[in-house]
Image (tube, rainbow, N blue to C red):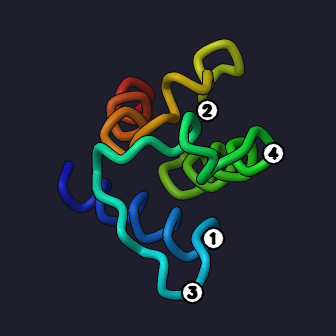
Amino acid sequence: MDDMREVVLKYVIQEYLEEGDDDINYDSPLISSGTVDSFSMVSLKRFLENKYKISIPDDKATPEAFDSVNKIVTLVKQYL
């Protein structure tokens, strides 16, 4: 689980944060803070599906489920 958390956190930092603005952790709000918007959430979902060879149903890929690294890992683990 820790490895997956690191992968997701690293991806979010690289893809969605400005240079030098990496002050987030596993529980930091991503969607509700505006760090990740709805378009970015779709690309994050695609990344996770490709990385872990899973399919996350659209009705499970909610803003609430993607609102922190820990919540994302919980979601992904349901489909491994």
Vertical position of residue 36 compared to residue 77: above or below? below
- N-terminal of the pair, mark 2 or mark 1, is 1
44 left or right of 22 in image: right
State which mark lies toward you, 4 or 3.
3
Q: Closest to the observer: 41 or 78?
A: 41
Cα separation, mark 2 vs mark 1, equals 21 Å
Q: Closest to the observer: 16 or 8?
A: 16
Q: Amino acid at mark 1?
A: Glu
Q: Which mark is residue 15?
A: 1
State which mark lies toward you, 2 or 4.
4
Cα separation, mark 4 vs mark 3, equals 20 Å
- N-terminal of the pair, mark 3 or mark 2, is 3
Q: Closest to the observer: 15 or 7?
A: 15
Report helix, strand or loop for mark 1: helix
Circles 4 and 1: CB atoms closer than 8 Å: no
What is the residue that sits farthest to the left in this orientation?
A: 2
Q: Amino acid at mark 4?
A: Phe
- N-terminal of the pair, mark 2 or mark 4, is 4
Q: Which mark is residue 39?
A: 4
Report helix, strand or loop for mark 4: helix
Q: State the residue at coordinates (56%, 34%).
A: 32
Residue 72 image-quadrant placement: top left
Q: Which residue is mark 3?
A: 19
State which mark lies toward you, 3 or 1.
3
- N-terminal of the pair, mark 4 or mark 1, is 1
Cα separation, mark 3 vs mark 2, equals 31 Å
Label 4 neighbourhood size at 10 Å, few (<14), some (14-19), many (20+)? few
User: At which x and y percent is residue 75?
Assistant: 42, 28
User: At which x and y percent is residue 9?
Assistant: 39, 62
Circles 4 and 3: CB atoms closer than 8 Å: no
Circles 2 and 1: CB atoms closer than 8 Å: no
Q: Which residue is mark 2?
A: 55
